[in-house]
Amino acid sequence: MIPAAFEYHRPTDMAGVLAVLEEHGDDARVLAGGHSLIPMMKLRMAEVPHLIDLQDVSGLGGIDVRTGEVHIGAMTTQTEIIENAELAQVCPILKEAALQIADPQVRYMGTVGGNVANGDPGNDMPGLMQCLDATFELVGPDGTREVKARDFYEAAYMTDREDDEVLTKVVIPAHGAGYAYEKQKRKIGDYATAAAAVTIVSDMGKCVQASIAMTNLSDTPVWSEAAGAALVGTSLDDAAVDAAVSAMLGDIDPTQDNRGPIEFKKHAAAVILRRAIARAWSRA
Amino acid sequence: MKDEVTTREDRVEALGGMGCKRKRVEDARFTQGKGNYVDDLKLPGMLFGDFVRSPYAHARIKSINIDKAMAVDGVVAVLTAADLEPLGLHWMPTLAGDKQMVLADGKVLFQGQEVAYVVAKDRYAAADGVELVEVEYEELEVLTDPFAALESDVVLREDLQGDGNGLPDGAHGPRKHHNHIFYWEAGDKEATEQVLEEAEVVAEETVYYHRTHPCPLETCGCVASMDKVNGKLTLWGTFQAPHAIRTVVSLISGIEEHNIRVISPDIGGGFGNKVGAYPGYVCSVVASIVTGVPVKWIEDRMENLMTTAFARDYWMDGKISATKDGKITGLWCHTTADHGGFDACADPTKFPAGFMNICTGSYDIPVAYLGVDGVYTNKAPGGVSYRCSFRVTEAVYFIERMIEVLAIKLNMDASELRKINFIKKEQFPYKAALGWEYDSGDYHTAWDKAMKAVDYDGLRAEQAQRVEDFKAGKTRKLMGIGLTHFTEIVGAGPVKNCDILGLGMFDSCEIRIHPTGSAIARLGTISQGQGHATTFAQILATEIGLPADSITIEEGDTDTAPYGLGTYGSRSTPVAGAATAMAGRKIRAKAQMIAAYLLEVHDDDVEFDVDRFVVKGAREKFKTMKEIAFAAYNQAIPGIEPGLEAVSYYDPPNMTYPFGAYVCVMDIDVDTGVTDIRRFYALDDCGTRINPMIIEGQVHGGLTEALAVALGQEIAYDEMGNVKTGTLMDFFLPTAWEVPNYETDYTVTPSPHHPIGAKGVGESPHVGGVPCFSNAVNDAFRAFGLTHTHMPHDHWRIWKTANELGLHG
């Protein structure tokens, strides 16, 4: 648990960050809350000759609730998400999910940007962002570009972000829908055995819009378009929910680990999704 | 000095003696981060050691190249077996009479085995050096299954093959196969098998107690410092038995024992993990001797989980016979014990399976047999007693599962079956079929109190309703009621049958009373969180009449403390606690003579009263212990040497047998396998209670570790011998989140042979807790045809049970 030697950079603005990234390419990594990267470095599973600490870079924090959308700076911590009353009004699922991430000590340090940018399939925020159809803002040498969360994840730890880019912001449409983040885990601090993010909009007793994403059931988060579609137009009768669960099971691809074999994970995923749908519908 | 105005009750209270909830004196420093642990030690010029470890579970070592590592700036030395061999230190004796490689000698036998030891000027350089040691391995066939190991042609321990004229005996007698370690038995096999054959009812089950690991917050480590000027070696470390470590270091290094000083500073939990001797200690000592400067070695969490001291890994085949109406007639158990690559179990020499022969439990079983086969596999060595006396948790888990299995076979209530078979109060002292003589007990009283406290009949009625509701589709949650009545055997132990490596398992206390009436007492034990500085002072306060707050308890420095075998197996109170009381009584005997002299009466005319000696029949005439202490040093008393000191080495006449009655009420979500512990009631009888608050804390801690083991904590291997649970991500360590509210209760049945009647309590809740949690899980599925399912009961295994019973539709 002793990392290899590295150079520590602590720039104060984005230009400084980009300069180090440009100079060192994939030998450099940015550090946000450090809860994924630092353990990897200590295990010597990630070699990072140049570590760029983002904590002094201005303009990367803050939660900005605007009309119809929420802007969350990459360095915003999970605790800040949990404690922001305005955010809890317009996008309550964020708080519900953040409270299920790790433990209070970790949440004081762990950031939204780090959680979504690292590409760890166990992280909770990527699936949530896909469910909410969030957009990630990336800053690089050629300026700023936006990528949909649903297009961002390629494989475990592989994302659309280039080595010389920094994820600076998450923009989330205000959902105004029934919602639920349901997670089964073995213990506090664990990644999900299965987790589901669900939003449902209802009108006159019918579902008019639904979005479903699953966490830690594939090498990327899984936004199951078909699962959401199976609910739309129904009053969430058993057949509709069965169809959504069935569609979701077709989209996930879990692997065996200490949490259990594939068969169990699929079963748990179905149970968790049913519970999430029921709770979201009760709030819709 | 005279204090006639205070009442006797006031004087008792002022002592802070036995029975009071004295606050832990250790906590002021621990809660402020002011503890002094081995890794806090910083000595001038100190070097740091780190291990190159094997990635393979079984491999031959073709070559080791240290050139690149030596080229790292700051690396001072890289030790391999070849460097240790001239010193005879490339292997070391284990506590079980086997030997273990200090550094890989030609091959490795488990993943994580120590291959080379890098010594560097800072911790980072040491780790960099480890990365650059080049080891060429030739992989060998891996054996992780003990049953397969006993059939395999693959020889794990080539060093034990002998000269070709048959397999040499092991430390515990003949070996049946080259991967076999020992066969050990207790009881009467033939008579037991005959009873089974003729029995009206026989229940059979294989009960696996999985491999796990004690996980103290502080990992193992040491600092070795060889002073070449005066020839003295000082070894600070996380040792649960500092004197035993000193003797072992002396025996294997040849350094005379008076030139070795072993110091256990504050220790952040032990639970058996810190009883054994590890390669890190030997390498650090050698490195300090070679370099002439201190060398520190601290293992990290992964090293701790993967290499130092596993626990359990017992496959227990059981048969239990009874009459149709539930009177048990016999118990048969054969255990296959997976000991890993070296037999490093920490058991008394004559007991290679520890006190597994307490497995007749709390029950009056007329005839029994226990046989244990120890087996080598490609797993880490250890076999320590994780928060239990030697293999007692295995024994109690076995019998408490077999009782449940028998209850199912008899279609009988499991509480009723226990009550029919408990050893009765009037049967104590009770000679058990497997050899032990239980000193005392009152099981029916404890059990009835527990059943009443939880409203057992009400719980069963609720459970029956739940089953109906489940079958009717009204709920997806089942309810389990876990019962356990455990009997422990702790306080090892009588020197006539308990020794480790020939070291008798007595313990000791040495007391010095200072002239102004305060005292220091030193013991051969060492607290790792048990609160000895608090409780031993309470014992002494009551025995010698000086306030506990005026008594310093010191342990862990072999230069100052009397010889003792350390702290594990709940032995501190039964053995060192007894020594403390006995030494205190020697103080009191001398104080009585001094008091009589001062009061100008005959010795027999004074008697002890709380904190003083009073003249019989004239209680207004007295001398306080404080006054007596001053006189002892400063007044010439004819025929009495100055000073007030005493030492006692206590060899207990018997073990102690704490017991308890536990109940767990659990809800189980059959669809996800998630458990919810609704209630946990723990009644403990540890004899005389020294400090109820510390007892309660010990019970909470022990139950929490029991919950961990029962519900998920394991060291699991894949078929290649890779450890799958090497970090706290996968190794379950419960936090406040996972822990239920515990209800504690007690009865008091003092030990008849212990000077103060105390029996020890630190491990009872673990020993009793594991079967209680497990029985609750099993019980939840009893109505659906389950007889037994193995621990750990994590989500997916519970789900699998439900699935196999057809509960998922």
Image: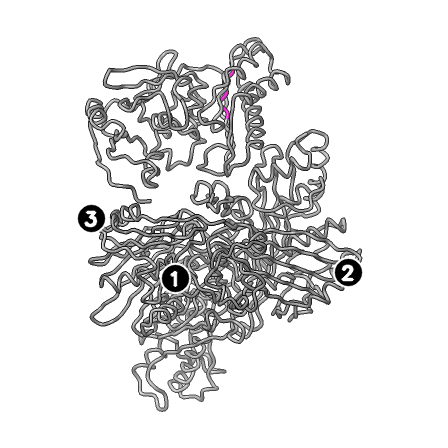
Q: Amino acid at mark 3?
A: Asp
Compare marks 3 and 2 and give the one earlier in the sequence.
3
Please indicate, yes or no, whether residue B745 appears anywhere in the rendered image. Answer: no
Q: Nearer the viewer, residue B190 or B57?
A: B57
Question: Secondary structure under badge 1?
Answer: loop
Q: Residue at x 58, y 24 (%)?
A: A274
The magenta segment: A196-200
Q: Nearer the viewer, residue B256 or B78?
A: B78
Q: Vertical placement of B68 versus A12: above or below?
A: below
Q: Is residue B523 left or right of residue B192?
A: left
Residue at label 2?
A: B197
* Residue B662 is covered by the magenta coloring: no
Q: Is residue B302 left or right of residue A204?
A: left
Q: Nearer the viewer, residue B466 or B410?
A: B410
Cα gap from disc 2 to disc 1, whole angstroms = 49 Å
In x, y percent, where is residue A218?
48, 27
* Residue A197 is covered by the magenta coloring: yes
Residue at label 3?
A: B73
Q: Amino acid at mark 1?
A: Phe
Residue at label 1?
A: B239
Q: Vertical placement of A80 versus B531: above or below?
A: above
- Quadrant position of residue A242: top right
Same chain check for tags 3 and 2: yes
Q: Main secondary structure of the magenta part?
A: strand
The chain ID associated with circle 1 is B
The C terminus of chain B lies in which quarter of the figure? top right
